[in-house]
Amino acid sequence: MSKRLGGILASLIFLLLAACSDSRDTITVGSKNFGESNVLAHMFAILIREEAIPVAGPIEYPNTQSILEALKRGDVDIYPDYNGTGLVMIGQNPLSDGDAATTRVQELYAPLGLTWLPRLGFANNFGLAMRADRAQELGVESISDLAAHAGDLTFGIEADFETRPLDGLQPLTARYGMEFGSLDVVPLDERNVIYDKLLDGVVDVGEVYTTDGQITDYGMVVLDDDLSFFPVYEAAPLARTGSLERHPALREAMEALAGKIDADTMRTLNSRVDIDGRSAETVARAALAEMGLVEGGVVTDEEPLVISASPLLAETGYGNAALRAARRAFTGREVELAASTNPLSAIGTGDARIALVEADAFFNLSGAEAVRNERFEAVAAVGQSVVHLLARTGTDTRAIGSIVVGPPGSAGNRLGTTIAAGLGLEATVEAAEEETAEALLATMESSGAEGILVVAPMGDETVAALTEGTGLTLRALDGWKEQANLVRFPFLREVRVPSGTYPRQFTAIDTLGEQVVLAGVAPDTTDMVGDQGPGAVATSISALPGTAVTALVDAIPGTTLIDPTLKQAAALAPPEPELPAAINPALDVSLLNLAIVLLILWLGWLYIRPEHR
């Protein structure tokens, strides 16, 4: 009996040792929870697996402190980090020399049982970014320039940056001698929201990483770190020394990646994850395949999904909102915004999938009243454009005999004759070649026109440029209510432009506005086409799926209902109430009901029959 018990105990000890050995043979890869770290961690895992080493992970950690502690404890064997971060995390002053920084972290981490492996080839430094127009408005090019305005600005940062001891928020503001008016702090795993906040004007300045794909994609400006506050952050694998000793092939796998990734490559990979919505693992394997380090996995790029928009809308916040919404609705698909003088025509020819247009684009305006084009449908409301009628100071609005508008297809061109007729003006319309302030003014000068008509969002830069030092002022559209114009052209609504919206505008101006929407092809592709829209619609173009329509609406903050005068996607229609079932829906049900009634009558008769009494 004792021998049998001894055998059982020996077997249990053997199994326990085997389990311990198996856990030590598995390499656990860690990652911080943002796109770039995820991509690099997946690269590590794929290369390690190629060496026939069991791999677990990548496992995400919320910040630098937690993943570094996990590495020290042995919960993680390797993860991607940055030499600048490595110095800061052990209380050392950061360095701007990458070679010196690497040598220093290797010396300091060796006694901790940790090894910095060869660098990957790029640096991802911290930076401060702004929208280009906001930076230009404030005259800011460097962080020192920012200091004079900081008290009136909101700074968007990630939570990790707020607590970093040597290269975070407090040291930054101390070095540049500034204090921001307010902070907008987001979790590290939601750091991409900072770009949304920048685009929407919620924050004025954002803390970013210099390899972020959004910088180029959204046209952001990274401010010059003129005092060299931010140190160099060169990416490299950080591993447990014991793990490298147990698995010599682990070091070989990581050295194969040394120097293979430059900043442009990393920015492209980040863009594929953070903007195109592809998985980090797919992007990592495709990149390794392109480098020749693994076989297979190359991602074949699809044709981008194109949103066509007029130049005036494409360059506004509405264009950015449409771009972001489409990227969220079509996850994993590349999306781009293309300027077009006639956006709906681009859908008709198949050059675009979605159009960003004003409501008038849905109507034929050649007759006495607007006739809706049923070939297109609105899928999401984005905002509002305003009709701007400009004339020189002293010019009687009723005396305007010629109006300059944008090129054919633009909202101003479509509405020019309609607005003039609705105001009772016997005015001709002159089309400019481009809808820019310079082109509109040049056409006005050459044609001798008395006015300019521009349809654009309120506060538009082109309209502001037309009223700055030109003698042109914004005019009220008096008389529009006459002749039932609000009924004949119901998509145009009365709006008021507050005083001070444009230079030399000292009073509020009553004018007209119309909704700006995202549009697509309607399911019904009949032959009804007006002269304001495309001449034909390719039969291969289908309506947007209902799921995509719903996703577009959900992705646009504060989305309002679509103007009821527009044809809208079926997915936006409220559910119809269920009608009550018919009294006799079927013969078998009717016969069953009759049988039940007869049974009840028979039971009643049994109860009251004379024999029972």
Image (cartoon, rainbow, N blue to C red):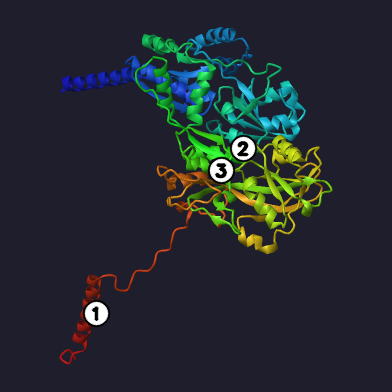
| Nearer to me, 371 or 520 | 371
Q: Nearer the viewer, mark 2 or mark 1?
A: 2
Q: Residue 597 carries which label?
A: 1
Mark 2–mark 1 distance (CA, rounded to whole Å)? 74 Å
User: Crowding at label 3, few (<14), some or many (≥20) Cα neighbours within 10 Å?
Assistant: many
Residue 53, image quadrant: top left
Quadrant (top left, top right, bottom left, bottom right) of the N terminus:
top left
**Mark 2 residue element:** helix
Marks 2 and 1, the one that precedes in the sequence? 2
Mark 2 lies on residue:
311
Marks 2 and 3, the one that precedes in the sequence? 2
User: Crowding at label 2, few (<14), some or many (≥20) Cα neighbours within 10 Å?
Assistant: some
| Identity, as a three-letter code, of the amino acid under mark 3 | Leu
Mark 3 lies on residue:
356
Query: Residue placed at 72% from the left, 29% from the top?
Result: 136
| Nearer to me, 469 or 94 | 469
Residue 594, image quadrant: bottom left
Query: Residue placed at 61% from the left, 57% from the top?
Result: 489
